Amino acid sequence: MATLSAIAITVAAATPHADPLAGANAGAATLVGFLGVAAVTPALVRIDLAERRLPNVLVGVAAGAWGVSTALRVAGGDPAQAVTSLALALAAAVLGLLAAVAGGLGMGDVKLGAVLTGLLSTGDLTALLQFWGLAGTLAIGVAGLRAFGTRSRRSRSHPAADSVRPGRGVPFGPCLLAAFWCVVVGRSAGVGIEAVVTML
């Protein structure tokens, strides 16, 4: 959690330089949102891996931090960013709900995905595409590894048991959180490189 918090602080400190029009509160808004996610990331990952669920209380902490972040943007004179954040989070929630109805996601994944989308939407849309693309890729990779491992174990113990159905689905929460932090770190690195080039 300390590492994630340090990353959040680094990105927040760089935010005003990355987007001068974002207003004086942009760094504080970014920091609040990212620290909220950092606080619950370890517990969410641990619980989802063990129990295949994302507790509402923990997702609610991240959602509350996003809400405060959005309010800070409005108070700082940047309502457009707040509206964009809310609109894209709502779109992610609707699409996630459709996926949940189809059996592809759990409701915890839908809520967490919407919150993380709202937090990342204050950057450019490329960050959102990277976030969802990476989360999906990680989930597919984990599913492939699990299927391969299950098939290998079954073939060793019961060679004729290929028709047995695999176990429970892949926990998507850790994939979402890993993708979120990868995008955040990428943004931080990009801002740092841009600052160095500017100074030169």
Image: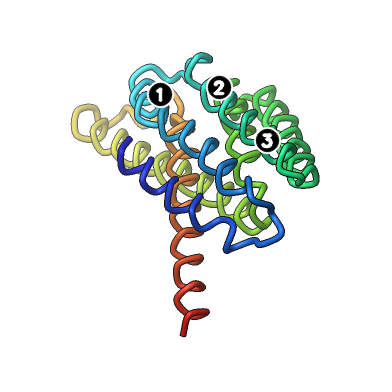
Q: Nearer the viewer, residue 183 or 7?
A: 7
Secondary-structure class at tag 2: helix
CA distance for labels 3 and 2: 21 Å
Residue at 57% x, 51% y is 133
User: What is the C-alpha distance between the residues marked 1 and 2?
Assistant: 10 Å
The amino acid beneath tag 1 is: Asp
| Marking on residue 48 | 1
* SS at circle 3: helix
Q: What is the x, y in percent for residue 93?
A: 70, 30
Image coordinates of residue 104 in percent, x first then y, are 60, 29
Residue bearing mark 3: 70
Camera-side residue: 79 or 143? 79
Left/right of residue 148 with respect to residue 115 in the rendered view: left
Q: Residue furthest left?
A: 156
Quickly name the residue at label 2: 108
At 53% from the left and 36% from the top, the residue drawn is 32
